[in-house]
Each structure stands twice: as structure tokens, then as C-alpha cells.
Amino acid sequence: MAKAKITTVFYCQNCGHESSKWMGQCPACREWNTFVEEKVNTKVSAPLASKPGQGREKPLRLSEITLNEEERMSTHIKELDRVLGGGIVSGSLILVGGDPGIGKSTLLLQVCQKMVKDGRKILYISGEESLRQIKLRANRIGEFGENLLLLCETNLGMIEETIRRTAPDVTIIDSVQTVYNDEISSSPGSVSQVREATNVFLQLAKSTGISVFIVGHVTKEGTVAGPRVLEHMVDTVLYFEGDRHASYRILRGVKNRFGSTNEIGVFEMQDKGLVEVANPSEFMLDGRPEGASGSIVSCAVEGSRPILLEIQALVCHTSFGLPRRQAIGTDYNRVNLLMAVLEKRVGLKLADCDAYVNLAGGMKITEPAIDLAIAMAIASSLKNRPIDDNMAAFGEIGLSGEVRSVSMIEQRIREAAKLGLTNCVIPQSCIKQVKNIEGIKLTGVSSVQDAIDLI
Ligand code: TYD
Ligand code: MG
């Protein structure tokens, strides 16, 4: 066997780009100051097929390959199953990424709870928390069965050996950035360490059929390799996102070899762990003021799910020469653009006004379909005239003030109808596509002016 050779390379901690010299800016992901020197042992990871007994020498015909149907395990958390495409595929490697403190460990511990009750054997390996800390968290979440196995370990070799010995159905590695291989000289969390660890888990999953969840923290400092470095190696990538100050959390599928990535799962963080939110629209519209100016409902599509949300605007006279503009939960530049359109095409006097736009509930939406609602909220606040509480608006606004069509129009209208709204303002060009929906009056508009006239 070739002798191990130790070389020095530089890795971008954001995207994993490799370079032989240090660079200020990563040419691949354009992030600054992310290169870190690492020593790599060029021998360590042999490719999957070169290990004895694992390579399949004879190629098979597609028709010769048999699938057994029962290969998906339900997590009994509907929102998670939905994002995974119907459950955990055995032998798959799933990466769960997200900011520290967002709730990754909590979610996965809840997966353990549900699956253990289902009679599955689960091994939870933590490199971040002590067994006592996990127990404390588990006590908050509720009753656990007998079959949950816990281990605190960071050494890759030990982890691999334990997983092979216990042979669980599912194993969870929390987090991959704490795992290290002592044959590699770079520190835990570096690109070469997390790659090596993921490679080992990949081989383990594929050769034994154990499903492996790996947790990866998204970090800004650049000293720890982020989950993006691993995205190409794993089967499924899920990101857990949400506003720190809002209680809801969104689980988003970014990559899925076993299902579509067009799905999101919505959760709410409560004192007893994460609770599924089956109807996000209801959750988002909760506590909406009645008869207030500058407020209107719009419908955004997240993945394949329409979600209603309230858009608020506050426009007031500026006391300084330069008006203040602020956008919370949506694109600031887009709001500026819409205000310019309102000024030029509708003739609203906004140049000497401060304007604040807020998506209530802490959602972040950049979809242009909410343009029309933002424009109507701004106009309503400026004129101090409330919009009908039962009205929702969606449509993209172009620079000439035209209202352009949006996708999935019918789903959006149905979602509005479900929550008891009675009036939808939609692009004129979409009117023909929509069949009659009971209880909903549709108003087609072809320009912003038409929409503002409704207020
Ligand atoms: P955690 O799962 O530890 O985050 P991560 O593993 O992504 O770093 O989540 C921790 C946060 O969740 C912490 O701020 C406290 C909060 N939390 C609750 O609000 N309720 C609960 O029942 C639990 C277990 C945590
Ligand atoms: Mg954690």
C-alpha cells in the first residue's frame, strides 16, 4: 500500500473549495477570508468500491435490480415525513443544517422519541452535550421508551465501531463538526475532518442499511466548516430556519435523492419541544388587527404550499430631509422599487415620507407575488384608509406599473377561501385560468392604479 503522504492545502470553510495557496476571496463562492490551512493525509479515505468485498464487479441490468417496498420508515412527525418525501429511506444519509440554537437537536430527539415508540432501535451520538444534558432535554420533551441508546463520543473510529456493533435502524450524529479522526492532523470541524467523517458515515450507511442523520451547524465565523461543504456527498439536505425571536421554524428540503425538494415543514418551538403546525396560514394570521389601515393579507408559496400572511405598512411624514425606508421580512430594494412605481405611475407623494414594511409573524418572503399587497398596504397607510379585512391580494408588479401573473393562482385563492376570506385581488391575466371558487369574489386588476382605486 502506498505510504501516507502529508501535504498542506487551503480550504474555503464556506464551500470547501481547495487551493494550494491562501487567497483572500474564494473564487468559487466569493466569500472573503474563509481560507484555512489544513494538513491532509493523502492516504486516508479510500473510495467506496476499493475496499475488499464492497465493490460489485459485475454490472447489473436495470431490470435485475429489485426494490422492496417497505424501505421507508415513518418518523411519525408528519411535517418531517413530508419534507423527506414520505419517511426515512433505509441506508440513506441525511444532513440537517441550521444556525446554532435553532432546534436541530430538539427535532432529532423528538424523532428518536416517536420512532422508539414504534419499536425501532435508535442510537443517538452526541459530541456536544453530556448525557445529563440530553436527559434534561428529554425530560422536557416527554416520555421516552426503553430502546433509545445514547453515547457521548467524538472519535470517529469509536463511533463507527459502536454503530456497527449496535446495528440500530437509525443513528444520529450531533454534530458532524465535533467528530474527529486522529489520523488527520487538522482540528475537528475543519473541512478535511468533516469530509472524512461524512465519507465514513456514507460507507457505513450504504453497506449496512442503517440510516444516518448528521447535524451540521451553519456558522458565520469561518473557523468551522459549514454544511455546504457536505451537500454533494449526502442523499438529503434539510435546512432548519426561522427567526430567533419568532417561535415558528421552517424545515426546508434543499436536496433529496428520494423525493421532491418542493416541500417545507412548519414547526413551532414551545416549552415542551417542537410542535407541528399543520395549518401555517392560520398561525401567521393570528392576532391580525381589524379595520387598521396599512394592512392586507397576501399569499406566498413556500415549496408547494401556499401560506397566507399579513403585510403591514406604516407611512408617515419624515421630519428629516432624507426619508427612512425599512423592510422587515422582505427585500428592502424591492420595497424601494415598488415605492418608486407608486410615485411615478400612480402619483402618490411618497418622496417626503418614511415608510416601514413588515411581514407579520417573522416570515421571510422574497417572492414577487406579494408585490401587489405591499403596494396596496403602502397606499392604504398613506391615505389612512383601511382595506377590507376579508381581502387578499397577490400579483407581481412591473416597472411600468402593470400587474403580472403569478404561478399557482388557484391554490392561493383556495387557501384564502379556507381561512374565510371573501375577496381576492388578482392579476387580470389570471382571471381566465381560475374556475369559480365558492365564497370568493375575484377582482382582476391590470395595473397598480386599478388596485389602489379599490382602497
Ligand atoms: P437545540 O435543539 O439545542 O438547537 P441546536 O441543536 O439547533 O443548536 O435548541 C435549543 C433551543 O430551543 C434553546 O434556545 C431552547 C429552545 N427549546 C425550547 O424552547 N423548548 C424546548 O422544549 C426545548 C427542548 C428547547
Ligand atoms: Mg444541538
Image: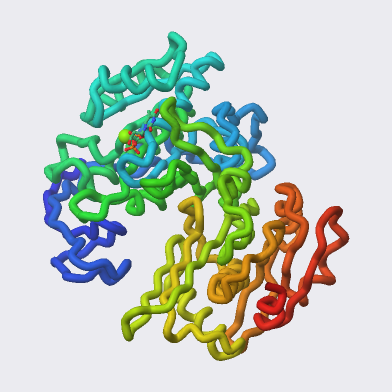
Residue 378: x %, y % from top left:
54, 73
Q: How is the image coloured?
A: rainbow
Q: Is residue 226 left or right of residue 75?
A: left
Residue 249 higher or lower than 18, as above or below: above
**What residue sits 33% from the left and 83% below the top?**
322
Foreground pick, 287 / 280: 287
Residue 225 higher or lower than 168, as above or below: below
Quadrant position of the N terminus in the picture = top left
**What residue sits 73% from the left and 56% below the top?**
411
Residue 106 higher or lower than 320, as above or below: above
Residue 142: x %, y % from top left:
44, 17
Foreground pick, 417 / 154: 417
**What residue sits 56% from the left and 83% below the top?**
342
Residue 433 sits in quarter = bottom right
Residue 356: x %, y % from top left:
44, 68
Q: Is residue 372 left or right of residue 125?
A: right
